[in-house]
Amino acid sequence: MQNTGKSMQVPLRSELTREPRPWAEAFPLAVVDGRLEVRLARSDEEIARSQALRYQIFYREMAALATPAMDAARRDFDAFDALCDHLLVIDREEKGPNNVVGTYRLLRQAVAEKHDGFYSADEYDLTPLLGHPVLNPPGKGGLMELGRSCVRRDHRNTATIQLLWRGIAAYMEAHAITALFGCASLPGVDPKAHAQPLSYLHHNHLAPEDLRVRAVAERYEEMNLLPADQINARRAFMALPPLVKGYIRLGAHIGQGAVVDHQFGTTDVFVLLPVERIGERYFGHFDRGDRASRRG
């Protein structure tokens, strides 16, 4: 999920204490057409390259407002960069610092609980998820938060997106993840401008009560803006951003209430995807092969 909701006034990335990542070197590599590969960032310099891509997309192509420090560094960063794993798609035919063409930021529950929690907690009360017995069974890795996703304009195609998902799938498998979650963004800061798609999500994809996170009270924006009989479901679905549509097709739930993020110029919704809800026909997105028969 693209999460652009929590951007903290923090030192530059190089000044932060980094969570050790001994597994990064051993993370499985996927190569497409001999040109693209997906893997975890293995160094601070590679993380900086992903931050530079995020800066270009969020602050130059989109309407996000960078801090002076971000503008000076030409990188998007916050305190969670030091804790997260950074999934990269690298164009191996490009030399130099601009070869990272896609990225996702991954934060596992075990890491979040050792520090200050998940960054989505700035927008949503995550209590229903954190102790849920189905999502936190013994011997499993629990939850994983996805965020800061972006792909360079000239690589926004099926091959790059599928490669990112192959990387996410391998990471999920390696850490026995039970559910993915995060905030996905609709453009603009007026929820009423998205009355049809927000109402459609509320009436058709709201999470079950025991899994239903809710926007924090001081940031809560109503999603139930239209009665169900006034919604054209097909048009409302097509009005959703591609990322949200993709998660809905995979079986995702939506949290209650939207959140306006003025820094990034977006209206955010909470997305929860329990791994067990992912339909078999979509396992091709994850490239799990015969492992699909060993779910759970």
Image: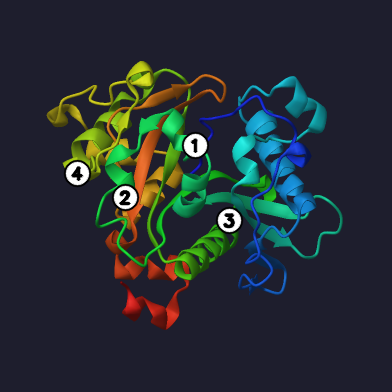
In the rendered view, tell whether residue 228 sits above or below residue 164: above
Q: Which mark is residue 252?
A: 2
Q: Which mark is residue 173?
A: none
**Left or right: where 201 falls relative to 24:** left
The residue that disc 4 covers is: 210
Task: Give the residue furthest to the left.
Answer: 229
The residue that disc 3 covers is: 157
Q: CA distance from mark 1 to mark 2?
A: 20 Å
Callouts 2 and 3 close, C-beta under 8 Å: no
Q: Amino acid at mark 1?
A: Tyr
Point 72% across, 53% down: residue: 100
Can residue 208 be seen here? The reply is: no
Q: Amino acid at mark 4?
A: Asp
Which of discs 2 and 4 lies nearer the camera? The answer is 4
Query: Which element type, helix, strand or loop, lies under badge 4?
Result: helix
Query: Which element type, helix, strand or loop, lies under badge 3?
Result: loop
Q: CA distance from mark 2 to mark 3?
A: 22 Å
The residue that disc 1 covers is: 119
Which of discs 2 and 3 lies nearer the camera? The answer is 2
